[in-house]
Amino acid sequence: MEQQKLPNSTLILVFGIISIVTCCCYGVLGLIFGIIALVLANKATKLYMENPEMYEGFKNVKTGKILAIIGIVLNVLFLAYIIWAVSYFGWETLQDPERMQELLEQYQ
């Protein structure tokens, strides 16, 4: 019997990488890619576990799942940091570099 490639195994890996790379986009874009990669990885894992000898490419799925989890954690941390900065300094202060510099000098 010829092995066939697991569906979306390469896509899961790519989305896991993108979720880490885009973690500095306010934490939203990478979070979306990470969640999609995690959902697809869970579906692919379930499919692979039903009939392991029929599919190949499970290493990509495992790697993509790990990268997606790391990406989700990084994006949640960055999103929490952005929310804290906006709540602490205010949106207007964050957009005004001179005012932000004054506040940072004041706290040193």
Image (spheres, rainbow, N blue to C red):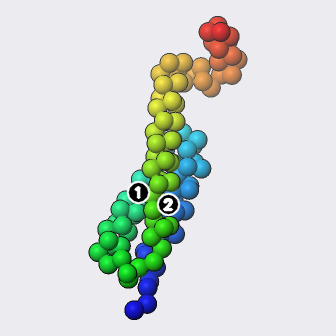
Q: Nearer the viewer, residue 37 or 50?
A: 50
Q: Amino acid at mark 2?
A: Thr
The image shows residue 36 at horizontal and vertical percentages of 42, 57
Circle 1: element type: helix
* Image quadrant occupied by the C terminus: top right
Q: Where does residue 98 sit, x and y in percent of width and height?
A: 70, 17
Q: Position of residue 19 (x, y in %)?
A: 52, 51
Q: Which residue is mark 1?
A: 38
Looking at the picture, does residue 41 appear above or below residue 4?
A: above
Q: Is residue 8 visible?
A: no
- Picture residue at 45% right of the left edge, 50% below the top: 69
> Quick check: can you spot residue 42?
yes
Q: Which residue is mark 2?
A: 63
- Distance (Cα) linking label 1 and label 2: 11 Å
Name the one closer to the observer, 98 or 9: 9
- The type of residue carrying mark 1 is Leu
Vertical placement of residue 30 versus 11, above or below:
above
Dots 1, 2 in contact, CB < 8 A: no
Residue at the spot 50% in from the left edge and 54% down from the top edge: 67
Residue drawn 47% across the image and 29% down it = 83
Quarter of the picture containing the N terminus is bottom left
Residue that sits furthest to the front in the current view: 53
The image position of residue 33, as x and y in percent, is 48, 54
Closer to the camera in the image, 50 or 19:
50
Counting residues from the start of the chain, the first of labels 1 and 2 encountered is 1
Farthest residue, direction bottom = 1
Measured along the vertical axis of the image, is residue 66 above or below residue 24? below
